[in-house]
Image: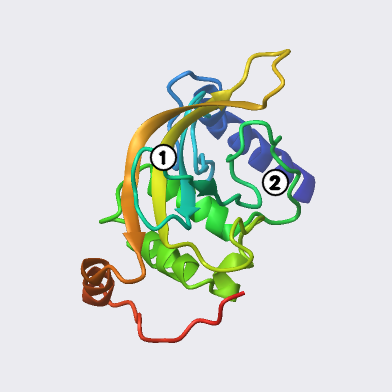
Amino acid sequence: MQRVASWALLAVVAVLSVRPVDNLLSSRQMMNTSFNPLHLVNTYGAFGTVGRVRAEIVIEGTSDAELDLDTRWREYEFKAKPGDPKRAPPWISPYHYRLDWQIWFAAMSGPDRYPWVAFFLWKLLHGDAGALSLLATNPFPSAPPRYVRALLYKYRFAPPGSDATWERTLVGEWLPPVSADDARFVEILKAIGFDTSASSRPR
């Protein structure tokens, strides 16, 4: 009797799996969808497709006192997400880096939806050791930068044979240059609930 019940259940699951499998193979795949009223066999997934182009935020800083066309900007490198076009993606196991993951979502929207990125820049302006520990490089080891900014790029894989892993195209500023003594920047951070009074210890 148990064997009959097992085979019957297997048959039911197989029949109910036809539509989810068909959906899986479809070019218009639906995610997080139930295909029967009993909700026994469903589809789940964060992403139905993998795009060929991805938006990425690149954070830069400068020690220059004045901002002009000759300003020398230096790039902060993240531990995993695309940055330097010549750096290959790392192998990550058994987890991914949360900052790299979350800032990718921010790149698909704007600073008003992801205000924590502005506060992260504030931390970099103060050489905060905790914030810097989340990054792969600190281009300002001696003293924090005078200004930081966030640029938005479009990344795609470089063609085979290239000496780079990525090709990137500048879209524009995601967040314009800000400084630690920018009163408007401080007021914006305070208005959205971030504490700018806590002292940070430079690295």
- Taking the spot 70% from the left edge, 13% from the top edge, the residue there is 160
- Residue 68 position, x and y percent, is 33, 43
Considering only vertical position in the picture, is 161 above or below 99? above
The residue carrying mark 2 is 5
**Between discs 2 and 1, the one toward the N terminus:** 2
Q: Nearer the observer, disc 2 or disc 1?
A: 1
The residue carrying mark 1 is 70
Q: Say which quarter of the image contains residue 4.
A: top right
Considering only vertical position in the picture, is 19 above or below 172? above
Q: Distance between the residues labelled 2 and 1?
A: 76 Å
Tell me which amino acid carries mark 2: Ala
Q: Is residue 1 left or right of residue 202?
A: right
- Residue 186 position, x and y percent, is 27, 73
Which residue of the protein is positioned furthest toward the right in this rendering? 3
From where the camera sits, is residue 114 visible?
no
- Taking the spot 41% from the left edge, 30% from the top edge, the residue there is 170
- Taking the spot 53% from the left edge, 71% from the top edge, the residue there is 127
Q: Do the residues labelled 2 and 1 touch (CB within 8 Å)?
A: no
Tell me which amino acid carries mark 1: Asp
Q: Say which quarter of the image contains residue 86.
A: top right
Check disc 1: other Cα within 10 Å, few if <14, some if 14-19, many if 20+.
Answer: few
